[in-house]
Amino acid sequence: MFFIEAKRIFIVMVGAILNAIALNFFLIGANVYASGFTGIAQLLSSIFQDFFNIEGVSTGIILFILNIPVAILGWYKVGKGFTIYSVISVIFTTAFLEVLPVRPLSEDIILNAVFGGVMGGIGVGMTLKWGASTGGLDIVAMVLSRMKDKPIGNFFLVINSGIIVVAGLLYEAENALYTLLTLYVTTRVIDALHTRHEKVTAMIVTRKAEELQTAIHDKMIRGITILPARGAYTREDKDMMVLVITRYELYDLERIITEVDPKAFTNVVQTTGIFGFFRRND
């Protein structure tokens, strides 16, 4: 257990380093912006420096400040474990942003946009894959997912669209287009490493359906459909559990399955839309 948690913290730290590299070595110097709270922190830092001549208000400090109320929200609404690792990620990211110099490796804005998106996407994807987040919008989305079925994707779209529009208005229109390129690259990389889909469907073939159902419902509020299944080769009777979860719950589900039934077969597929009740009714 200690080894797993230590490895999780190490992965979070590596993800924070990659996010800091993406910002300080590629995006900040080119006035190309990341998504979510990181992009908002970049914009605010640029505004303070370029329009008010206020030095010393760095992206890392602003990012840390923005995440304070979100962390408090996550602590009470999401869960202590998820929030703690998210806070660790934010702290490491802030520290590395302060330590690493802002020094663009290229003067080509396209290279900065692409490689910044790749590095940031790898950092976020690794962090999500191990059950944490980079804070900010991920925690807000997790809160919304624990409530009624809210349009999380629309919320992300509004925030990121605002970043693109403000970047285009304050600076050159090209910066907005390159920011859009960065967001696209980041999303594709995250999708390859983890999943950027809001919801996924898990189909679990297991011999321990009752134990799994209890363990899943102890951790998350999700409806489960259990269907009879039979192995084509062994002719052994089993059960197939079908449930729809958000991408933020995927790590918890994987851990539960591994603990309860390591021999279970699980297929996770993208869910493009759902109708009816998404949560388990108590």
Image (cartoon, rainbow, N blue to C red):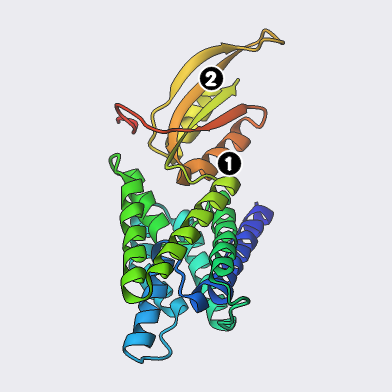
Residue shown at the point (59%, 32%) measured from the top left? 260
Which is more toward the observer, 273 or 70? 273
The quarter of the rendered structure image containing the C terminus is top left
Q: Which residue is mark 1?
A: 255
Whether residue 84 is visible, yes or no, is yes
Q: Residues within 10 Å of mark 2 (few under 14, many from 20)?
A: many
Q: Earlier in the sequence, mark 1 or mark 2?
A: 2
Residue shown at the point (53%, 55%) measured from the top left? 185
- Figure check: 274 above or below 227: below
- Figure check: 176 above or below 100: above
Residue type marked 1: Arg
Q: Which residue is mark 2?
A: 240
Comparing labels 1 and 2, the label whose residue is closer to the camera: 2
Q: How many marks?
A: 2
Residue type marked 2: Met
Element under label 1?
A: helix
Residue shown at the point (47%, 24%) measured from the top left? 242
- Figure check: 219 above or below 73: above
Q: Residue 139 at what x, y percent from top left?
A: 40, 56
Whether residue 68 is visible, yes or no, is no
Residue shown at the point (30%, 44%) measured from the top left? 151
Q: What whole-number distance in Å separates the C-alpha atoms at marks 1 and 2?
A: 18 Å
Q: Is residue 49 left or right of residue 188?
A: left
Q: Residue 107 at what x, y percent from top left?
A: 58, 77
Element under label 2?
A: strand
In which quadrant of the rendered view does residue 39 lie?
bottom left
Q: Residue 258 at what x, y percent from top left?
A: 62, 36
Q: Residue 177 at what x, y percent from top left?
A: 42, 63
Which is more toward the observer, 53 or 265? 53
